[in-house]
Amino acid sequence: MKREIDLKGLVPAPVTPFTLDGSVDFPAIKRLGSWLASVDGVKGLVVLGHAGEGTYLTSQEQCEVIGAFKDAVNDSIPIIAGITGEGDMVAAKEAKRALDAGASAGLLYPSHGWLRFGYQDGAPQARYARVHEESGLPLILFQYPDVTKATYSLQTLLDIAKQPGVIAMKNGVRNMRRWDTEIPIIRRECPELTILTCHDEYLLHTMFDVDGALVGYGGLAPEPLVELIAAGKARDYPRARAIHDRLFPVTQAVYHRGSHMEGTVALKEGLVARGILEHATVRSPLHPLKEGAHEEIAAALRSAKLVD
């Protein structure tokens, strides 16, 4: 009998640590995974996402990373794998490999050709159906930013959310007009769906309408984000605002950069400052941050009282 997956809380999307020579650093995964799992309120880990540089890993490495994080958390919380294969058949095979490697669920990305060219009506619904049916892996619906052509319409979201095997939605629409309009409708139409914000840089606005957060930010600052989720659920705006303001220098240092992808490198620099990682090695096409970034991020973490 499969364990029910409860993701109502903080679901960090951790980085993938590498050794200085660029291979996967399994001892560092053990440190990172066990630390995150020890934080009360962390309900699962999403590995192989954007923050985890999942598309920069080989298929074998992806499976090894899933297994390493599963071992690191001692099976205390579910490991969810990013599923990024371009074609539906390819994605279904990737999902099956993830299940066999120990993943409890998958975060299914849109086919990335859609980012540039858009998608045909019905194609996203068919993608979720095929990947779940052929792999047996429970899936999280992933809503991309409104500025991309891979963002799903409200009707498409509702269609997917009602399909068998879809257990949650990670919503990163990054259009607050759509957020404020669509989340109440999704809540009404799909009351069993777990709704998670992934707005790392807009957490305060989105924290009052959700069951939790699925964010890379959670892999660096899980403790205050658990507090922020609790404040949002309690409708305690002053408390949520205070946590937001405390974290804002960290938010700026990590996410207010030229490219959101730089946030991955910044997260690793932050984890070095927190003593979890020994260095911030990334894989190409990512590059190290400019000189002085580590000191800037460490100072922000000190101001948030996350490091001494």
Image: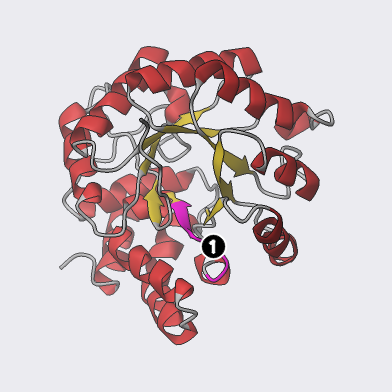
Report whether 49 appears left or right of 16. Answer: right
- Give the residue displayed 46% in from the left and 72% down from the top: 233
In the rendered image, the residue lying farthest to the right is 121
Residue 50 to residue 111: above or below: below
* 7 vs 114, nearest the viewer: 7
Residue 258 at x, y percent in the picture: 55, 51
> Which scheme is used to colour this image of the protein?
secondary structure
* 50 vs 282, nearest the viewer: 50
Residue 248 at x, y percent in the picture: 42, 71
* 169 vs 112, nearest the viewer: 169
Kindly tell me whether residue 24 is visible in this rendering: yes
Residue 198 at x, y percent in the picture: 52, 53
Kindly tell me whether residue 112 is visible in this rendering: no
Q: On the image, which quarter does residue 63 sit in? A: top left
Q: Secondary structure at mark 1?
A: loop
- Give the residue displayed 37% in from the left and 64% down from the top: 225
- Give the residue displayed 40% in from the left and 44% down from the top: 13
Q: Quadrant of the C terminus?
A: bottom left
Residue 108 to residue 8: above or below: above
- Give the residue displayed 33% in from the left and 61% down from the top: 296
Report whether 301 appears left or right of 108. Answer: left
Kind of residue indicated by mark 1: Val
Residue 156 at x, y percent in the picture: 76, 41
Residue range in magenta is: 208-214
Estimate how packed mark 1 is, as few (under 14), some (14 to 19) or many (20 or more) residues with alpha carbons within 10 Å.
many
Say whether residue 176 is magenta: no
Q: On the image, which quarter does residue 177 sit in? A: bottom right
Report whether 50 appears left or right of 126. Answer: left
Q: Which residue is mark 1?
A: 210
